[in-house]
Amino acid sequence: MNSIKRKCIRWVAQILFKLLYRVEVRGLEHYPLNDERYVLISNHISLLDGPLLMSFVPNLPIFAINAEVNEKWWARIFTRHFEMYPLTSDQPMAVKGLIKMLRAGRRIVIFPEGRISSTGTIMRVYEGAAKIAQLGDAKIIPIRIDGPQYTRFGRLQGKVRQRFFPKITLTFCAPVSLTNCPKDINKQDKAARRLEMYDLMTQTMYATANTHKTLSQAMREAITLYGRDQIVIEDMQREAMNLGRLHIGSIVLGEAFKQLSIKSGNVGVLLPNVSATVVTFYALQRLGWVAAMLNYMAGINNIRSAINAAGIETIITSKKFIEKADLEDLLKQLEVSCRIVFLEDIKDRVSLKDKLLAVVKSKLPDKRAENNSSADDIAVILFTSGSSGTPKAVALSHKNLLANSAQVKACIDFNSQDIFFNALPLFHSFGLGVGMVLPVTSGIKTFLYPSPLHFKAIPEYIYDTRASVLFGTDTFLQGYARHADADHFHTLRYVIAGAEKLKASTRQMWLTQFGQRILEGYGVTETSPAISLNNISYTKEGSVGRLLPGIDFQLRAVEGIAEGAQLWVKGDNVMLGYMQNGDNQNLQKPHQGWYDTGDIVSMDIHGYMTIIGRAKRFAKVAGEMISLARVELWIEELWSEHEHCVCSIQSDRKGERLVLVTDNPRADKASIRDYIISVGGTEIMLPDDIIVVEELPKLGSGKCDYVSVDRLVSDYFSSVSQVE
């Protein structure tokens, strides 16, 4: 009788859920109907989660539930009709009971977080589900619930736009076995279980995210989720732009581009961090054209190289920007080979009729309003920094950028109440991918600042804008800290560093002066850009964090390098390929999807990765491979207030010899020798020569310009030999 009653209740509940919330169940083909043992785990985002799983999970499993929640009157409406197993923290024997039921052939549903998420992402994960599955010899079936967080049954009030009846999806993933969890119960083993469960949950969050769409479609979906009035962009003009205005502006500008007979294809964008750049970017996306983001600080030779590689015939820029940045001479040289289109001229052509038509088009369904682009088409061309050679043209697809945004969001709890402060240039992969695409598609406000080098002004703007998330490189974060007071950064929730090695002195400075822990990450332009990241739950000082979900890796040994191995990665965020001569169809693609980062890394048993150095930045001294980055790190520890770069030159005696380029006028070999030997270095790791400069050459991203340093060293020794 009870079985018939449950089936009737499930049937009625399914009808109501489908009627009110348009519930869609995906991946049921992954749900096994055999007699094997399975533990079902799910994210926990609302009070509706339990009733949803009770209604749609086949075979009526047993539900592990918090004992206090089980006694609530509103919970009893459902729980009294189904098999519940109340759990409390002071009843360890209850877990043994679940294991017995599992071994008896029953399936169990558990929420590993133990409580409803107040962030919308995975919070602290407990090891109970892993322990039950491991001791019960069961596989785990991950389930992703999405949609209820937008209702009043969630815990995100004030963080997301709430609706009465949003669409809900339940996604079943393929069963997995826990392979790394030991069966002992000491403290380390509990941590290992928690870590593996956390990885499984974040992998599920990423794997079930919809990244198979264009950037333009993703912006329209953001309008649906967060509303047209959700502010996403603000710049130095202090005029906030919401999603609705951004969408309409991209339509107006896109139509104007077509009227100017701009040749479709790869269009250069030579603009700073302002709202107009974002509108231009999305106007090109809407047309299905490719935005080639030019680095206006790279110099004419590198810009010409970029134009040739991407086949750029038209460049979009601004008269006001060219004048303020003093780029008139650069523009004259670019006009020789490219058509220059100024945004000011386009603005004068736009009529009221054009704006009204754009408003109408913004209301049209996707199929009538969008171009025929697909998620796998090229969306943007970015250019590598050229820190160790000529910049390369990196072709990234819509899916590359959206996948990387989903990977980052699976690990960090950004929400629509956050305010990003992005001073990193939009021609930089970090500035574009994490600093613009992620917030626009997530309904998050971003304040765009024109230059990361304004060390005195930026702390004031962070304070004034009440920013909660700051992105930067070590160089920039160090500069901000030196010019900030204790309360300048009091609103920051996250400070995220990338693009260059974070110095221990910078990390300590932010922690002691501002109480802020910097989360260091790692990425490259070719991976859109993030590869690994520390977060609040799992962090290790000195590392660049653990690999993001959805990224496979290989560590390949390099001859002569004893410590570490070369990192290769594969995933949806890995580029389509390098472009040459503007040929979009014949890219230099990563072989079988594997991209060689060129970095030598080490990885501990928990997956935390440490960058040892670039494979190209090793010198063979007296037959030994020496990491130049390692020697630099030691010298930075010795003189942390100064900038240093170690390079190598040919030596008849030792094969290669090390040269230190520094802005420390008191640098001396004796001090360097004493310190390096004291920290475990050897004599062959000592620089043979020291060159003191006023300032080390830097790229726009804050990285050391190794090409310029090598040239400086070469010129120095050429002049010395001539004198001799």
Image: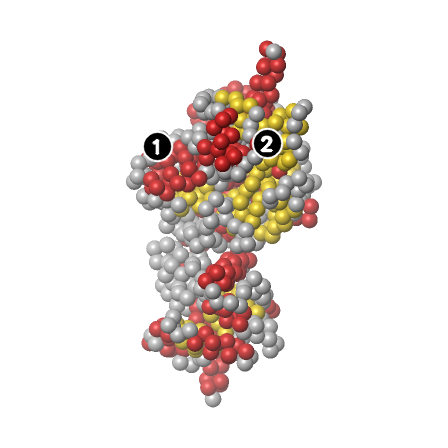
Q: Based on the displayed image, in which of its 4 quarters is residue 682 positioned?
A: top right
Percent position (x, y) of residue 205? 51, 58
Q: Is residue 161 left or right of residue 686?
A: left
Give amino acid for label 1: His
Res 684 label: 2
Residue drawn 45% across and 74% down? 95
> Which secondary structure, mark 1?
loop
Percent position (x, y) of residue 85? 43, 77
Percent position (x, y) of residue 44? 43, 64
Q: Based on the displayed image, in which of its 4 quarters is residue 241 positioned?
A: top left
Residue 447 vertical position relative to residue 657 in the rendered view, above or below: below
Q: Which residue is mark 1?
A: 483
Q: For mark 1, does the 10 Å Cα neighbourhood hold few (<14), some (14 to 19), or many (20 or more) residues?
A: some
Residue 142 vertical position relative to residue 571 in the rendered view, above or below: below
Q: Nearer the viewer, residue 34 or 360?
A: 34
Residue drawn 38% across and 70% down? 89
**Residue 586 seen in the current view:** yes
